[in-house]
Image: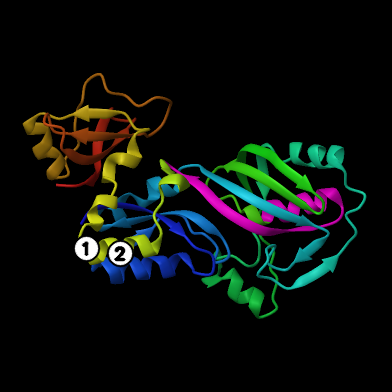
Amino acid sequence: MDGILNINKPPGITSFGVVARVKRLTGERRVGHAGTLDPTASGVLPVCLGNATRIVEFLIDSGKTYRAVIELGVTTDTYDAAGQVTRHADPAGVGLPQLEQALASFRGAIKQTPPMFSALKSRGRPLYKLARAGLTIERKSRPVTIYRLDLVSWAAPLVELEIECSKGTYVRSLANDIGEALGCGAFLKELVRTRSSIFDIGDAISLDMLEEAVKSSDWPRFLHQVDSVLGGMPSVTLAEAQQADMRHGNVLNIPGTVPPGAGPGYCRAYTPEGRFLGILRYLPDSGLWHPEKVFV
């Protein structure tokens, strides 16, 4: 089975735990998720099966949308509700004007420092293992983009936000940084991913729904086609000789097809009958296309 499941991950389970259950239910050996959700978070978790695991990188690169609840006046070591409280402060001095001003400073392109409690590695060891051992190391800040940061509700000390952001954004760090900007501290109390790539939470299925569908042997109806998440790429139709070149890993000359912008780009390749063949990568130095992912 090749395809992608739009799973609504419940809180209290890891993303790897979701993958393990999907493997067990479907019997498919090649299963992987596209974009980790913390154990305390819930919402959209795309799970790729079979050949779809080969396009996980393109799913991870897509933007995400979250609904987050931040509590002001409390700071934790993990920046979320799973951590130990490290500081209390009185948020009484924070009003709507101060909150709006703080949020404005986090919109657009920003630099963000990943939390110690994360799966990022230092010299081969995950940071969260170092953090549990009581160690703190310097982390380099990295660029992320907050496309949208909307205030949904404000009932002190709770702030509800809707966040649309680029890959690599830690909403936990964003919550902590907003608290620092307000001078009272804050932690991420609740997080729901409402959208990832083309997948929306309104169409997501629970693990229990998948289990029931497996029992009736009609669970493949929940699979999205491999190329369904690649709609942002241009597409080309290949003649028979070009299809043979692609299958054998040879570069292709496709006149009149150049990706937008400078540098390398990608396109989807199809047969004249509409069968998905894979992904081609443009080589700007030669003007040719290299078979990046072949699905034949």
Q: Is residue 247 left or right of residue 156?
A: left
92 vs 239: above or below: below
Where the N terminus falls, by quadrant? bottom left
Q: How far is disc 2 from disc 1 in space, using C-alphas?
A: 7 Å
Which residue does the image show at 32% across and 66% down from the upper left? 211
Quick one: which residue is furthest to the right in this view?
93
Task: Name the residue rendered at 25%, 51% in the picture.
Answer: 221
> x, y percentage for residue 178?
76, 49
Identified at 37% across, 34% down, the residue is 264
Q: Amino acid at mark 1?
A: Ser
Type of amino acid at the residue the image marks with label 2: Glu
Specify start and end residues of the magenta stretch as a single range.
Answer: 173-197
Which disc number belongs to residue 216? 1
- In the picture of the structure, the residue carrying the numbered disc 2 is 212
Tell me where residue 149 appears, x and y as whole percent.
Answer: 66, 39
Quadrant in which residue 83 is drawn = bottom right
Task: Please state which of residues 10 and 140 is positioned toward the viewer in this rendering.
Answer: 10
Q: Nearer the viewer, residue 282 or 12?
A: 12
Whether residue 148 can be seen here: yes
